[in-house]
Each structure stands twice: as C-alpha cells, then as structure tokens.
Amino acid sequence: MQTSNTTICAQTTPPGSGGVGIIRLSGPQALSIGQQLSRNQGQARHAHYGPFFDGQGQQIDAGISIYFPGPDSFTGEDVFEFQGHGGQVVMDMLLRELATLGAVLARPGEFSERAFVNDKLDLAQAESIADLINASSEQAARNALRSLQGDFSRQVEALVEQLIHLRLYVEAAIDFPEEEIDFLADGKVANLLHEVSQQLAQVLQVAQQGSLLQEGMQVVIAGAPNAGKSSLLNALAGQDRAIVTDIAGTTRDILKETIHIDGLPLHIIDTAGLRESPDQVEQIGIERALKAIADADQILLLQDAQEKDTPAQLWQRLMPEQAMPAHITWVRNKIDLTGEQPCVSSGDAITCLQISAKQGLGMDKMRQYLKDCVGYNSTLEGGFSARRRHLDALQRAQAYLQTGADQLAYSAAGELLAEDLRQAQECLSEITGQFTSDDLLGRIFSSFCIGK
C-alpha cells in the first residue's frame, strides 16, 4: 500500500442545501484531525454522534462521524467521514476548519485515484464509479455496478491469462528449435489463438453495448427548411420540444434532446434548415448546424416526400462543399401527403426510411432502425459499462491477434507472433491500469467529481 503524505478533504454530497451533507477526510492525519473536530475516540466503523467544534471550541454543527482505518477503507488510507446538516454554509465552515487543522482540498477524483494507487480498485472499476453516478438509464446503472464489482475486469484478466499461457507456449517453441516436434505447426498454437480471439470478440461485443448505454449516440436531424425536422424531434421525444410552424427558418439554433429507446440513450439534435439566408441570426444557427453534422454519429437527412431529389442531389444542394458521409440515412417525411406506406429500404449506398413525423407513421420502424444501425441489443445478458478508451484497447488487441494469426498461417514466424501477443497483452492491461501512462491516469481522474 502506498500512503500519501498529505491528508485530503472534500464535500462528497452535491453543493447546495439538503437534509444531510457529507465531508470525507483521507490520509495519514485523518484520525488526529477527525478527533480534534468531532471528539470521536476513533472506534473503527462505529457511528459516533456529537458536536463538531472549531479551533476556538465553538460548535459548528452536530452530526455523525465514522472512522475507517486503513488499509480496510475505500482509499486504502485512514478515512474519517462527517455527516452533518446539508446547508452549504455549514459545509464550508467544516471544510475551512479541516484546512486549518492541516488537511488540503482534494482534486477531482483524488479519492478514487488513491484507491487505485493502493490496489483497492483497478482502473476499470474506478471509472465505473463515475459511470454509476452519471448513468442516464437503469440499465446503464446496472452495467456500471457490475463493472464496479469487477465483472469487466475479471473478463479482461481471463483474456490476459490466456495470452500469457499462449505466449509461454510460443516462446518455448522458439527457444527449443532442436526438439523433434514442431510446436508451431502442431495445431495447438493455432487452436489457442483462435480460442482467445473468439473470447476477445465476445468481450468486445458486450463492451460496445456498455459504451452505447453509457455514452449514447449523437443523432443529427438535417435538411432544408420546412422538411419537418422539428416535428421529427418532437415525435422521437414524445413531447413538443421544438416549435413547429409552416414558416421557413423557424428553427434558428440547434436544439438537443436526450431520449431512451429500450435503455439506449440517443442525443437527438434538431438543426436550423440549411439554406442561403441574409438573416444574421439564422446564419449563426446554420453554422452551428454544420458543426453538429460534422460531429454526428448518425445523420438523418430529412426530405419532404413530395420532392423528387435523390439523396445525393439533396446533399449536393444543401452541402455543396462537402462529400456525403457514410453514416447518413435518407428520411422521406410527410408520406401522409403522398399516400405512401411507412417502410425501411436498404439500397446499395444508403438506407431510406419513409415516415410521417407529424402523424406518427413509421416512427416504430425508425426507433428500431436507430437501434439496429449501432448494433444495439437490449436483451444481451451480463452487460458491463465501458468507455471509448476500453473499446480502443480491445480493438487494438484484436488487430494484433489477427496479425499474429496471419504470421503463423503464412510464414510460421514464431518471433513475430510472440511480439504480436505481447502487444495484445499490453493493450488489455491498459484497461485495468496494469500498463497505463501517468498522463492517461491524470486525464481519467480529473474528469471525476470532487469528493470521489
């Protein structure tokens, strides 16, 4: 266990007024400082009720204090917790007194960082704390809890163990070439490599679902004025969030709404109609629309079904200076005016949805399509939370395993296979923090809230 020479403190409940406010203290002086403030004798894990005093002996508040001796605490250090009345003035007074007694205010995420440094949590578990706090749906919260309990980490560690076993076998084949049996050609290495690749693919699939549940997908509705973009936003949101009129240019700024489809968060962005406009305010809205389109995970290119332009012609008219991206869906709206039926059709280059947002026709097909286009499966069992960096690490490991398999199949290059296996193992170790740069750790924990 590594113990810092500083004792940190922070308010762990949200700032503002509340029935109860909690302040946490962690470090080598936690017990002595906590006893001075609360007169708590320091019985481990015993809730002590009493007054909290300042240095002049004046009472600041009254509440509960609990001492958690290290290493059996959240951070692995001595921890003292104060539960008082939740007024912000009271919380600030207690924090000032703790600072006077020698504690320093914690950086964002510093408590979780100390838990990671002291091997109380691995990096994936530490990140799941923030994911649990920020979960936007029940399923996302359940997944984050599974990660906090170590489900994700155990699967990654199992992959690492398989790779270590495979590396030992390959290294032995390289080190003892005089043996009569060609270990690289006997099929065992290829079989083991196939097994670990399959297992990695399964973990990656679940991680992709976890990432979608945690971060969601950004969907931008783009099109010409009066194509029905705001009506589509309202239909997806299930309420009137955007103003809808027959006047072109009603929407002058981007409007964002987060909805959930079977637990999948979708960040729907309604944009200003794309056109040449002399109106300065509308021009700013169009500029913001172009920025949102550039950052989108999925673009719904909306068109009045009464118009005859092809998707390429429509895009060229609206965005003449940009090539049409691959992640775009053509949505023909207002089919109630043309007598067409709702449907989803996939052409060679682009998928077309026929709907009427105002009448609600085809909206069930659109919701299912949005889930399908990101490969979301709400029935997938045993999910866990994951972040984009986890997906990146898993995908890089997968690429190294594929390269290694090619080296084995085409040239029986044991040395090159061994290096690919080593690289894949390092990628997986980045997830749990066994092989992670200090710079990455700083970026991860600085994104946490203060007090965690």
Image (tube, grey):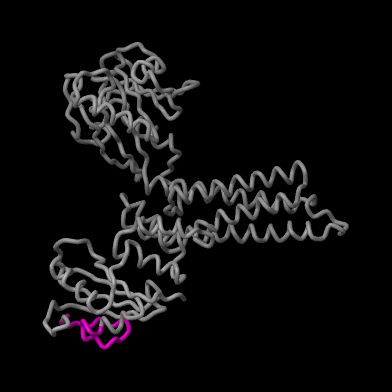
Residue 362 forms part of the magenta stretch: no
How many numbered dots are placed on residues in this image? 0
Q: Against 208, is 120 above or below?
A: below
Left or right side of 296 for 229: left
- Magenta-tinted stretch: 35-52
* Res 141 quadrant in image: bottom left
Q: Nearer the viewer, residue 418 or 208?
A: 418
Q: What is the x, y in percent for residue 448?
A: 34, 58
* Residue 40 pos. (x, y %): 24, 85
In the rendered image, which quarter is residue 351 located in? top left
248, above or below 140, in the image: above
Residue 449 x, y percent position in the rendering: 30, 59
Determine whether 158 is above or below 304 in the image.
below
- Most extreme residue toward the top, as rendered? 308
Quadrant in which residue 53 is drawn: bottom left
Q: Please provide percent x and percent y for residue 188.
A: 74, 53
